[in-house]
Image (spheres, grey):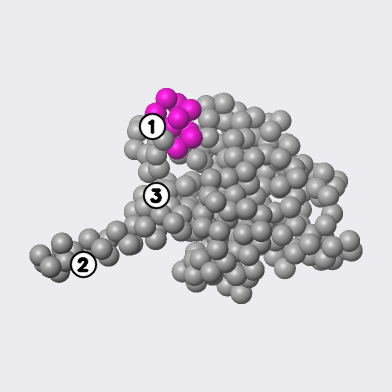
Amino acid sequence: MANKLKAHFAAGKAAINGWLAIPSGFSAEVMAQCGWDSVTVDMQHGVQDYQSMVQCFQAMDKHPITPLVRVPWNEPGIIGKVLDAGAWGVICPMVNNAAEAKALADASLYPPLGKRSNGPIRAGAYGTATPYQKIANSEVMVIAMIETQEGIDNIDEILSVPGISGIYIGPSDMGLSLGMEPMLDREEPIIMEIYQKLLASCRKHGKFAGLHNGSAAYTARMIKMGFQLCTIANDSGLMAKAAREAVSQARKEGGPAAN
């Protein structure tokens, strides 16, 4: 029982991360077979709830991916529940300072390192000591989302908090915070400078940096820049893109009868 993604990062490798917005075990099962290193259930902006998240985990269990969750907010109840269900990492929105980073770490880790309550209903065994409780603090990844100017300004303090494993950048909210349009795959020079600053801080503190991307090409660029946890769109977006391309090709090549 170990976190394969954490070992992946320790070896200096980048991970390609899938993203589940669709609340379906079948969709999750299909995605888990597509070669991702990890797959994240999105409980913040997807239409997933706790029950659908568990179904996604159950559907992905037989495949060699690491299950992660983006929780709705920095709240200990939901953080503990997704870890109890078997998540090996928590991605938490809007972590802006050291106090918020400490609250995230406290909710994610068992005493004496944190304040997480014991009850790993799927991750281990409820009410008894299992190997899971012995390794959870060293294997669970605690990932703070950096999405605001405040978070950027406080990056060294955030990464200095014990228990924080790395950061994950939300480009859309970061853009909004800076007075820009919300979008992925950003090209603004100021954003590139921010990315470099955040990456430098991660290197200094020995932590990893993740980024949400809209396309495979942009993802490849960001891996070369130094990001290690790189997401490509989400399941619903990839499905829609493939469907639009298929319909467009059929209409184009089918001639007048297809239009």
Q: Which dot marks residue 228?
A: none
Q: Residue at x 67, y 39 (%)?
A: 74
Q: Which residue is mark 1?
A: 181
Task: Give residue 36's position: percent from left, percent from top.
Answer: 49, 64
Quadrant location of residue 258?
Answer: bottom left
Q: Nearer the viewer, residue 124 or 245?
A: 245
**Mark 2 or 3, nearer chain start:** 3
**Mark 3 or 1, nearer chain start:** 1
For the record, the magenta segment spans: 172-181
Eye-nearest disc, 1 or 2: 2
Q: Which residue is mark 2?
A: 250
Q: Looking at this rendering, what residue extends furthest in the bottom direction? A: 62
At label 1, the amino acid type is: Glu
Q: Which residue is mark 3?
A: 214
SS at badge 3: loop
Q: Residue at x 42, y 25 (%)?
A: 179
At label 3, the amino acid type is: Gly
